[in-house]
Amino acid sequence: MAQNMGFFAALGRFLSFAWLKNAMRLNRKADEMFTQDAEGIGMAFDIQQEEMVANYNELRDAIAQIEMVTEQKRDQLNKSNEEEADLIRKREGALVKAQQAEEGSDEYEKHAAAFERFDTRINQIEETQERLEAEIEQTSQSMVRHMQQLTKMQADVQQMPQEKAEAIAAFVTANQIIALNDRLAGIQTSVDQGPIEAVRKTNRELTAKARISERIAGTDVAAQDEEYAQVGTGSTSRSRMEQMLAERRGESSSKQPQSQESSLKESEGDDRPEI
């Protein structure tokens, strides 16, 4: 049983937490809706004004009810005063009649009973009068405070349209100042900067992608192997060319002394004198 109670208590706390969390989320969303643009600010003031008007009407109706009850008590008090005055006259008449009658006689007892009846009712009326006068006084003092509050609420409601206009103007002005300062500082959105900035941004992105692509291509194993094969082929061809050139230079060097020697012998034979 205790475990079940603990479970339900924990479940209640969880549900309360979830409800409060959702309520806070809704409040934040509502605040964002009412503060993101001039229309939202206007809606916030309209809703607040409607609530203030409703509260004003409720307070006004309550004051009217209190005033109606107070007026009824005043009427009751006036009737009590009139009845008291009439009873006082009757009591005085009974007293006069009792004085004229013989004490102890039936006539005297009749006047004495009437006097007591009038006097008792006068005492009851006086108690009612004291109660009514106290209640009327207390209600009147309370009515003064309520009327002051009602007057203040009325002034607040009448002030709402002007305050709404001032709040919207302040919001728009602040946003314009921020936008102008951002332009002066070079902080602009792509929409403000136009299509040229969009083209520039695209070119920068493509250039960055091209650089990354070049780096990736440089690290490709197949490309590296092909590069090494080309370098190896070029190196082998170059070595073979250099070797053949060296051989030809050697052959040319060995043929040149023989040619010079033959030329020398021919020149010597030509210089001998004829016989």
Image: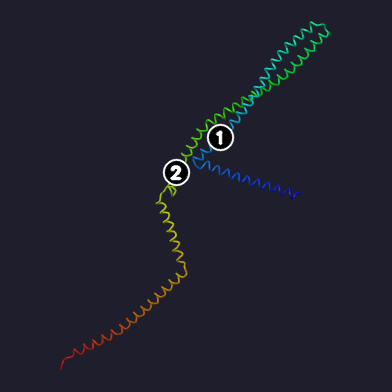
Q: Relative to 63, is 115 on the left or the right?
A: right
The residue under label 2 is: 179
CA gap between label 1 and label 2 equals: 33 Å
Q: Amino acid at mark 2?
A: Ala
Counting labels gives 2
Q: Amino acid at mark 1?
A: Glu
Relative to 266, say whether 194 is above or below. Answer: above
Q: Secondary structure at mark 2?
A: helix
Mark positioned earlier in the residue sequence (1 or 2): 1
Q: Quadrant of the C terminus?
A: bottom left
Relative to 28, say whether 253 is above or below. Answer: below
Residue positioned 61% across, 46% down in the render: 22
Residue positioned 69% across, 21% down in the render: 132
Query: Percent x, y for residue 26?
Result: 58, 44
Q: Relative to 167, is 184 on the left or the right?
A: left
Query: Percent x, y for residue 81?
Result: 69, 16
Decide: few, some or many residues near mark 1? Use Cα within 10 Å; few <14, some 14-19, many ≥20: few
Q: Nearer the viewer, mark 1 or mark 2?
A: 1
Decide: few, some or many residues near mark 2? Use Cα within 10 Å; few <14, some 14-19, many ≥20: some
Q: Secondary structure at mark 1?
A: helix
Relative to 217, say whether 83 is above or below. Answer: above
Query: Percent x, y for residue 11?
Result: 68, 48
Query: Percent x, y for residue 71?
Result: 64, 22
Instruction: Looking at the picture, tell me which residue is in the foreground, 222 or 112.
Output: 112
Residue positioned 29% across, 85% down in the render: 255
The residue under label 1 is: 50
Instruction: Looking at the picture, tell me which residue is in the foreground, 260 or 14.
Output: 14
Quadrant of residue 30 within the rendered picture = top right
